[in-house]
Amino acid sequence: MRIIQVEQGSPEWHAARCGVPSASNFDMIVTTKGEPSKQAQKYLYRLAGEIVSGNSEETYQNGAMQRGRELEAEARKLYEFMTGLTVAQVGFCIADGDFAYGCSPDSLVGDDGGLEIKCPTMPVHVGYVLDNVLPTDYIQQVQGNLLVTGRKWWDFLSYYPGIKPLLIRVKPDKKFQAILKAELERFCVELKQITERIRQ
């Protein structure tokens, strides 16, 4: 993978991601069952528009997103304390190969791992803790992070102050990743075609 070392959330980060399929949106390309998502066309059109205009539409932040960003550093420190591992913050990672898709890890861990941090509302976090599995909403993102980076494992941390955290280690699901990779490559080909058409 190639790492573009910029601060996440900065104008440079938005520029790096502009028009590039990113793991946080891989659920718009493929479902958890490995089927093409019905949201793919809308996502295609958005990315094609970003490429041609040079403007990213992902600058919006609601209150929950802002709160999550504020708690993320706290959660990262807790993760280091819980695991004894040291994390590294990076900007945007782009997969090796002929097709441009990427991810913005919350952290890379050593040479083999990564970390996805979520700081949801209290009832959502309690539900995650009780279920004690990787929440379904983040399967595509976490498997996508693993696919892009080639890492051996990815830790998922859900954090809410005053309530025990949820920490789940996820390994690559080779079958799902093969489907995801094929859908991403097909998506990238179609994205290039659409971009060329709207540039004419």
Image: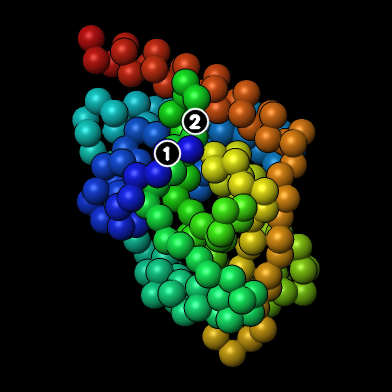
Looking at the rendering, which quadrant does residue 4 occupy? top left
Image color mode: rainbow
Q: Earlier in the sequence, mark 2 or mark 1?
A: 1
Give the residue displayed 68% in from the left and 70% down from the top.
167
Percent across and percent down for residue 103 are 47, 45
Give the residue displayed 33% in from the left and 18% down from the top.
195
Asked if one can make out residue 191 in the rendered structure from this viewpoint, the answer is yes
| Separation of residues labelled 2 and 1 (CA atoms) | 7 Å
Along the viewing direction, whichever of 111 and 16 lies nearer the viewer: 111
Percent across and percent down for residue 14 are 29, 47
**What label does residue 155 carry, if any?**
none
Residue 127 horizontal side relative to residue 162, left or right: right
Q: Residue furthest bottom?
A: 162
Q: How many marks?
A: 2
Looking at the rendering, which quadrant does residue 100 occupy? top left
Circle 2 — which element?
Answer: loop
Disc 2 marks which residue? 96
Q: Residues within 10 Å of mark 1 (few under 14, many from 20)?
A: few
Along the viewing direction, whichever of 5 and 63 lies nearer the viewer: 5
Asked if one can make out residue 144 in the rendered structure from this viewpoint, the answer is no
Percent across and percent down for residue 67 are 41, 74
Give the residue displayed 67% in from the left and 48% down from the top.
152
Disc 1 marks which residue? 2
Percent across and percent down for residue 62 are 37, 64
